Amino acid sequence: MNISIPKESRAQTAIPSAPIDPLLKDREAAPLLGISVPTFWRRVADGTIPKPIKLGALSRWPQSEILEVIERAKAARHDAA
């Protein structure tokens, strides 16, 4: 039996209009900051790096948040001068 589904009822693939912000593992984010993974977690604990997004047992950081940490450090460097 062949059933025809009206075009309006078919599921459409959603294509995001905004650029995708990749989620990074601690092992991927730490090298962007030039630090080790244990130091990365110490910076999370002291608030320098934002807390992760939790996906079940997984911890991930949007790349934009890691880049923002770098920008804040650059701004603080210029403010201290």
Image (tube, grey):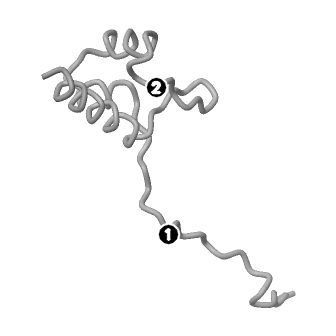
Task: Estimate the x, y position of residue 69 in percent, counting from the top left.
Answer: 33, 30
Please indicate whether residue 1 sits to the left or right of residue 44 in the image: right
Q: What residue sits 51% from the left and 27% below the top?
A: 52
Residue 4 place in picture, x, y as percent: 82, 90
Q: Residue at x 24, y 32 (%)?
A: 75
Q: Nearer the viewer, residue 46 or 58?
A: 46
Q: Which mark is residue 39?
A: none
Residue 12, quarter of picture: bottom right
Residue 77 horizontal/vertical position (percent): 18, 25
Which of the 4 image quadrants contains residue 80?
A: top left
What residue is pinned by disc 1? 17
**Residue drawn at (44%, 56%) of the image:** 20
Instruction: Identify the residue at image location x=31%, y=38%.
Output: 67
- Relative horizontal placement of residue 74, taking residue 81 as reference (left or right): right
Residue type at the position of mark 2: Pro
Q: Which one is in front, 42 or 8? A: 42
- Left or right of 65? Residue 81 is left
Q: Amino acid at mark 1?
A: Ser
The quadrant of the image that shows the C terminus is top left
Query: Upstream in the sequence, badge 1 or badge 2?
Result: 1
Rendered location of residue 32, percent (x, y)? 24, 31
Do the numbered discs 1 and 2 sit on residues whose CB atoms are within 8 Å? no
Q: Is residue 35 above or below residue 32?
A: above
Cα separation, mark 1 vs mark 2, equals: 26 Å
SS of the residue at dot 1? Answer: loop
Q: Residues within 10 Å of mark 2 (few under 14, many from 20)?
A: some
Indicate which label's residue lies in the foreground, 1 or 2: 2
- Viewer-nearest residue: 52 or 69: 69
How many marks overall?
2
Residue that carries the numbered disc 2 in the rendered image: 50
